[in-house]
Image (tube, rainbow, N blue to C red):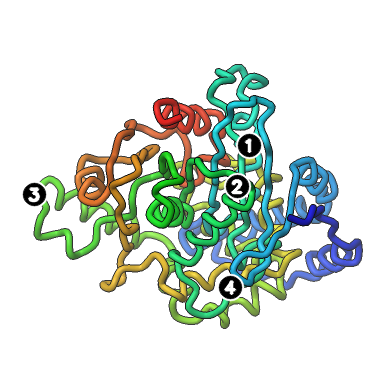
Amino acid sequence: MTPFRIDVPQSDLDDLSDRLARTRWPRSLPGTGWSRGVPVDYLRELTEHWASGYDWRAHEARLNDLPQFVTQIDGLDVHLLHVRSPEPDALPLLLTHGWPNSVVEFTELIGPLADPRAHGADPTQAFHVVVPSVPGYGFSQAPPAGFTIDRLARMWAELMANLGYHRYGTQGGDLGAYVAPRVAAVAPERVVGVHIDGGFGFPTAADVPEMTAAERAEWEQMQQWMSGGVDHHALLRAAPQTFSYAWNDSPVGLLAWMMQKFKEFTMTVPTPEQAIDRDHLLTNVSLYWFTGTSGTSSWPMYERLTVADDGGFAWPTGQRRVPSGVYGGGSALMRRLAERDNTIVHWPQGNPGSHFVAMDEPLAHAADIRAFFRGLR
């Protein structure tokens, strides 16, 4: 483990400022709002804030307040945050971020998990928190072709062993919701519980014949929701290299793409920053920009890591040895399908946050993680 600190060269900040100032703005059709994509007026205002109101150095310093390391696992350099709890009996917890996100996703969650006493919660429910950057994201090395969820899960199990953690929990949302169960599958004697956000994938067309009439109606509603936004799975499965040129060369192009996806993921609010603090969003976008990983982070989609044979969402390969909990798991249909291959012991109804609940409701998210692991320690 080599200690690591983020230190973006000033020349990179100057280059970003110059590129933002020279943005060539497209025309837009008045009165269309978000119906055709990110509105120009909205993105102009957010870009101006990124250029003159947002302070990267302040957020870089906040990130550097968290202990960081780089290590090599399976031939790849892996960056991680490793925050040990002040509580001696804390349970180690491995968090895996999603897409289009980074370790920034968990920065507001780490404190309540590692030091619940300081946040008005039960100190006996503390965690030693480990947050690695998925290969291809942030400061982790890009993965080779053919990189699989199983390989990543084995890497994470090796990482936890290298840290001296031989009994731990796993947690994740989005891409992390596929990784967390697989870590338990490859190291069931080590993992005490799996906590994920949102449910074990989505039903696929293969599940339809087994559905009741009510479940089929719910399935049809899901299909309408999934087809209502930009299908990034289809784009990135087809040609991630093609799209990466614009993301890597134009910060506004990258910002527009990110805001499109966060708008779809937050869903219930007019703009993403009404759910998630805008500087928090910009820190995530800035990390992608400064590390040049907007393209490499999309490679897992091309490798079809989370895609079923019929083009839908693949269910994470089930494992029954380790108990699982789902935050905001949704309907009885989702639970019935999840229970075919997983031992579900925690499925609370309702979720106060969005798709990225760790960012917009970190205290509620931490409380649910503590509730799930309380009986597994």
Residue at image location 50% in from the left, 73% down from the top: 147
Height in image: 348 above or below 186?
above
Q: Nearer the viewer, mark 3 or mark 4?
A: 4
**Cα–Cα span, label 2 and label 1:** 10 Å
Vertical placement of residue 2 versus 246, above or below: above
Q: Amino acid at mark 2?
A: Glu
Whichever of callouts 3 and 2 sits on the residue coming sooner in the sequence is 2
Q: Residue at x 75, y 69 (%)?
A: 23
Which residue is identified by label 2? 105
Instruction: Kindly check if marks 1 and 3 are in contact, taking CB atoms under 8 A apart as contact.
Output: no
Q: Where does the N terminus fall, quadrant-wise?
A: bottom right
**Residue that label 3 marks:** 213
SS at mark 1 in the image: helix
Q: According to the image, label 4 marks what residue? A: 143
Please tell me which residue lies in front, 221 or 56.
56
At label 4, counting other C-alpha atoms closer than 10 Å, the crowd grade (few under 14, some 14-19, many 20 or more) is many
Q: Nearer the viewer, mark 1 or mark 3?
A: 1
306 relative to 8 in the view: left or right = left
Task: Tell me the amino acid under the disc marked 4.
Answer: Pro
| Residue 275 makes an appearance in the image | no
Q: Relative to residue 173, is residue 3 drawn left or right?
A: right
Q: Identify the image quadrant of residue 85.
A: top right
Label 1 crowding class (10 Å Cα cut-off): few <14, some 14-19, many 20+? Answer: many
- Element under label 2? helix
Of residues 251 and 291, the one drawn nearer to the viewer in this rendering: 291
Quickly name the residue at label 1: 110
**Of callouts 2 and 1, which one flags the residue occurring earlier in the amino acid sequence?**
2
- Label 3 secondary element: helix
Q: Amino acid at mark 3?
A: Ala
- Residue 277 percent location from the top left of the image: 64, 40
How many numbered dots are placed on residues in this image?
A: 4
Alpha carbon of mark 1 to alpha carbon of mark 3: how far? 43 Å
